[in-house]
Image (cartoon, rainbow, N blue to C red):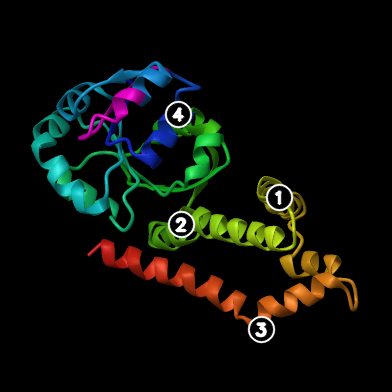
Amino acid sequence: MKYGFLGCGNMGGAIARALSGKTKDIAVSDRSGKAKQLAQELGVAYSDNASIASSCDRIFLAVKPHMMKDMLAPLQDALAERKPLLITMAAGLEIRQIEEFAGTHLPVIRIMPNTPTSVGKGVIPYCANELVTEDMKADWLADMSECGLLDALEERLMDAASALSGSGPAYLYLMLEAMADGGVACGLPRAKALDYAAMTMAGAAEIYLSTHTHPGALKDAVCSPGGSTIAGVRVLEERGFRGAAMNCVCAAYAKNKELGK
């Protein structure tokens, strides 16, 4: 098999789903058996950890950080013999720790994807050790192209990226729900309020990405003097919206650092 997934929860499943558009040469495994349904849905193989370690060329490590050491321990002999490319997405764990748990020096790519990867709109910062050749990286990037934005990043910044783009969808869903609640409070039907809020968020993001105009300038363009929008912005400022948004990213960053210890 070209790709294997050790663990296949929400994030592993999102990447497997995106990759399956490029290749069906994929095997997935997990402890609960839930990945069997995903395998059937995507038309890929359902396997076990030992088989994936001994047969797959590129292996995604898609388990929680605290589970990584115990998962890799029984696979050390197979990994040392074959030295497949490992792709880790465990928050807080550095490449050196993955190699330590694997018991050998082998190619490792560290990524921090987010759940919009499953619809081709993901943000995936990545870094790699010196054993990942340029050809190996280029081929992997080509296979991952359906996932969204893949961006090379220094490993020292991966925990910060995780706190922003990795955790970010949760923050935005909270904002989406809150905006829709406001619409409902003003009389809009729930379904319409959610769709209006979601499309507004997506459209605003698209304007920034297509122009890279500073967000402050984009905000100013919507705020007419003495208008309703600036009245709403004033409430957000009074309630500490910006500070809360900054602090939630910083709190997630601190937790990522803790997870790596």
Question: Contact, CB < 8 Å: mark 4 with mark 3?
Answer: no
What segment carries the magenta color?
Answer: 24-37
Task: Label 3: state its secondary structure.
Answer: helix
Question: Contact, CB < 8 Å: mark 1 with mark 4?
Answer: no
In the image, which is nearer the foreground, mark 1 or mark 4? 1
Residue at screen point 34% across, 24% down: 37
Tell me the residue that label 4 is attached to: 17
Give the quadrant of the N terminus.
Answer: top left
Sequence-earlier tag: 1 or 4: 4
Task: Label 2: state its secondary structure.
Answer: loop
Sequence-earlier tag: 3 or 2: 2
Tell me the residue that label 1 is attached to: 189
Task: Label 4: state its secondary structure.
Answer: helix
Image location of residue 59, percent across then percent down = 29, 32
Tell me the residue that label 3 is attached to: 238
Task: Residue at the far right: name it.
Answer: 225
Image location of residue 194, percent across then percent down = 66, 50
Question: Contact, CB < 8 Å: mark 2 with mark 4?
Answer: no
Residue at screen point 36% across, 70% down: 254
Task: Label 1: state its secondary structure.
Answer: loop
In the image, which is nearer the foreground, mark 3 or mark 1? 1
Residue at screen point 71% across, 47% down: 192
Q: Residues under labels 2 and 4: Cα distance?
A: 20 Å
